[in-house]
């Protein structure tokens, strides 16, 4: 299995950062430690990392998620993050945008610009990225149900900025399966939704070589209450489902699989998290090679973004969250993450203030610059404890895969959809969430400041205030676009969308790009699709 | 149905927000505490909540919000209940900044449960507002 020579050759081919790789006291450090016949980073089965030189070549991307108010408000926050040394943008959309509704939709009342930025038309998207050349930043957009619509707008903004589509770099979450399982931001039923995901994958494969068209996300599964093993298993199973859907749509595995990316939670149980990331890489490599026949090493290597867990943050004694976030972030780094978002300490109270968001970024910078943990790849590999925990999480994940495969009669895609429809995922997650709540209630788990060490609670921290006038301003912007646009062009675009939605062999991305350019709103595009696809409701079971 | 036996509580998410972990956990806490839970789940509106509260003859309505829309949506739930002729108390759970608490009380919200509320506090709040009603 292990091959020090192959690793050594790959390492020597890598470009390294200009920094001494030694301890603070001057002890020189190897790029990785372990026996010659052990595992190596960048080598099959990639347990120890996707690259031979890991952070010696490039630190993880410090990618802070931001979005609130109107596109102008978020544009200012983006520019502040870039000026503070952040090197990737990450967009949070408000609830109506996430669910494909316009700001003037009756159900959007009270939610416009609240939990993220409000985007109704391509003109809003232009404002969001004003003064930020799309060819030279990498952008992440966290959106799922309306992902193809918003992606079409982003492509349109790039076109208008004169940026070659091949130069657009970034990630769109576009992971609809976990919405039914955990985050619940679904609109259409699972099958047509998977078609939309696949359309975007096909389009990106053909036209956006630097874009990651799906970020297969365990983050929300974990936040909804799952265990680490469930997060791992459900996420990878969703990944297998997307692979099967793309192959069924006619794509060759090694043409798209290198662009698949992942997104995991960094929860508070340090070693379990490190083991989870290691197990994820090993499982993905094996399934991609052995089950799906991927031969390109980039198809076999799992690369992931990490965000520290929101649910560990407490409203009580909120400054304590700075310590939690730092430790969670460290697990992500020791687990070999490719990019990282650190939560702000005030997020159990409200969206973060600018100061809290900057402290969160500073936490990553301390880990990167001061801690000395970026010199050596997979520093916990070889620990009997971590290796054993890695094996155990892998074993538990394989049990879940076996269940899904039975449910899908051999197809992971069918198994995942079946277990969404029969409520299995939801129940598994709700059970795990309740088990944790029981531990808290019985004092078997101490949450500092909540059920232990409660003296000195001071939550008098300033929180971000979102001006209720945001909604009014956004409604005015939208009304202006509706007045100024070419109504005939809008009607033609919507007619094309509806007729192409009815033919599953047509890729919907070109019609969506045309609609966005004609200032068709997010809500109008989604309604046209919904007329064909229908709407999904889950059975309310608690 | 005879009053004064098991308290009946309607639980719902109002608006577009899909964060249902808290609501699902609260449903089980209340059930384990001997209350009867009618779980309406996601994407409810003030009107559907009022209709369900009427039909199910509940003692308390619990709504969960994590999306910052509580100042708009929570009062609308109270208004819809009152418009349907119900005096049912409304408990809000989720993320409500302290500065918004006076406005929530003024809008007729009977109790607000924040992050970290214990099982005992959840039960106490629901039983407390039911007794007061």
Image: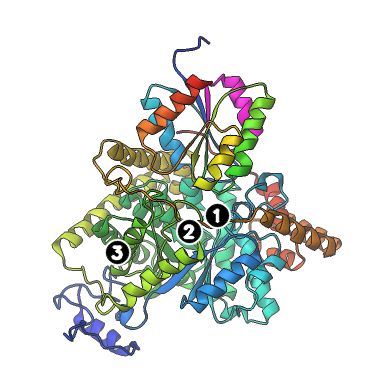
Helix, strand or loop at mark 1: helix
Disc 3 packing (10 Å; few <14; some 14–19; many ≥20): many
Q: Quadrant of residue A525?
A: bottom right
Which residue carries the number 3 mark?
Answer: A331
In screen coordinates, is B117 left or right of A335?
right
Which residue carries the number 1 mark?
Answer: A194
Q: Is residue B90 above or below residue A12?
A: above
Residue A242: assigned label: 2
Q: Residue A285, image x and y in percent?
A: 33, 66
Which callout, 2 or 3, points to the residue nearer the camera?
A: 3
Q: Residue A15, image x and y in percent?
A: 35, 89
Q: Is there CB contact under 8 Å for labels 2 and 1?
A: yes
Residue with the most extreme top position: B2
Query: Are the residues under marks 2 and 3 on the same chain?
Result: yes
Helix, strand or loop at mark 3: helix
Span of residues in magenta: B43-62
Which callout, 1 or 3, points to the residue nearer the camera?
A: 3
Quadrant where the image shows the C terminus of chain B: top right
């Amino acid at each position: 299995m292990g091959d020090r020579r192959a690793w050594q050759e790959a390492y020597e081919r890598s470009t390294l950062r200009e920094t001494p790789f030694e301890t603070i006291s001057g002890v020189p450090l190897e790029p990785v430690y372990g026996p010659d016949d052990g595992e190596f980073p960048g080598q099959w089965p990639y347990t120890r990392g996707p690259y031979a030189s890991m952070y010696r070549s490039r630190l993880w991307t410090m990618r802070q998620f931001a979005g609130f108010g109107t596109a102008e408000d978020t544009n200012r926050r983006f520019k502040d993050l870039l000026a503070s040394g952040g090197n990737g943008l990450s967009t949070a959309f408000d609830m109506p945008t996430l669910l494909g509704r316009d700001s003037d939709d009756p159900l959007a009342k009270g939610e416009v610009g609240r939990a993220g930025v409000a985007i109704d038309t391509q003109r809003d998207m232009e404002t969001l990225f004003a003064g930020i050349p799309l060819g030279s930043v990498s952008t992440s957009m966290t959106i799922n149900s309306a992902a193809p619509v918003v992606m079409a707008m982003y492509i349109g903004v790039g076109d208008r900025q004169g940026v070659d589509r091949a130069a657009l770099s970034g990630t769109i979450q576009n992971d609809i399966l976990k919405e039914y399982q955990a985050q619940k931001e679904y609109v259409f039923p699972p099958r047509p939704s998977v078609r939309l995901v696949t359309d975007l994958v096909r389009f990106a494969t053909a036209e956006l070589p630097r874009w990651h068209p799906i970020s297969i996300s365990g983050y929300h599964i974990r936040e909804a209450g799952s265990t680490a093993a469930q997060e791992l298993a459900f996420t990878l199973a969703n990944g297998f489902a997307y692979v099967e859907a793309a192959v069924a749509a006619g794509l060759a595995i090694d043409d798209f699989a290198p662009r698949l990316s992942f997104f995991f939670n960094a929860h508070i149980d340090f070693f379990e998290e490190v083991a989870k990331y290691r197990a994820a890489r090993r499982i993905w490599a094996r399934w991609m090679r052995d089950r799906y026949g991927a031969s390109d090493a980039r198809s076999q290597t799992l690369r992931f973004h990490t965000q520290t867990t929101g649910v560990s943050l407490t409203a009580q004694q909120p400054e304590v969250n700075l310590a939690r976030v730092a430790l969670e972030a460290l697990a992500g780094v020791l687990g070999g993450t490719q990019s990282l978002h650190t939560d702000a300490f005030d997020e159990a109270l409200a969206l973060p203030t600018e100061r809290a968001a900057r402290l969160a970024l500073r936490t990553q910078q301390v880990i990167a610059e001061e801690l000395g943990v970026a010199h050596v790849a997979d520093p916990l590999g070889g620990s009997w404890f971590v290796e054993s925990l890695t094996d155990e999480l892998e074993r538990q994940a394989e049990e879940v895969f076996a269940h899904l495969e039975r449910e899908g009669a051999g197809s992971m895609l069918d198994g995942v959809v079946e277990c969404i429809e029969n409520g299995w995922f939801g129940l598994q997650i709700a059970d795990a969430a309740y088990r944790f709540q029981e531990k808290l209630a019985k004092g078997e788990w101490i949450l500092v400041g909540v059920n232990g060490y409660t003296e000195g609670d001071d939550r008098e921290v300033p929180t971000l205030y979102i001006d209720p006038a945001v909604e009014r301003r956004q409604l005015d912007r939208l009304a202006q676009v509706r007045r100024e646009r070419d109504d005939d062009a809008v009607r033609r675009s919507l007619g094309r969308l509806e007729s192409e939605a009815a033919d599953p062999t047509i890729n919907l991305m070109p019609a969506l790009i045309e609609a966005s350019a004609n200032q068709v709103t997010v809500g109008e595009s989604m309604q046209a699709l919904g007329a064909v696809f229908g709407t999904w409701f889950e059975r309310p079971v608690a | 149905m005879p009053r004064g036996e098991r308290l009946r509580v309607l639980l719902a998410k109002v608006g577009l927000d899909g964060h249902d972990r808290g609501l699902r956990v609260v449903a089980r806490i209340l059930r384990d505490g001997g209350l009867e839970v009618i779980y309406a789940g996601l994407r409810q509106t003030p009107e559907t909540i009022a209709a369900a509260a009427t039909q199910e003859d509940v003692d308390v309505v619990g709504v969960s919000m994590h999306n910052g829309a509580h100042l708009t949506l929570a009062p609308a739930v109270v208004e819809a209940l009152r418009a349907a002729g119900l005096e049912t108390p409304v408990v809000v759970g989720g993320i409500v900044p302290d500065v918004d608490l006076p406005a929530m009380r003024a809008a007729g919200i009977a109790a607000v449960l924040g992050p970290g509320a214990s099982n005992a506090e959840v039960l106490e709040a629901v039983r407390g507002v039911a007794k007061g009603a």
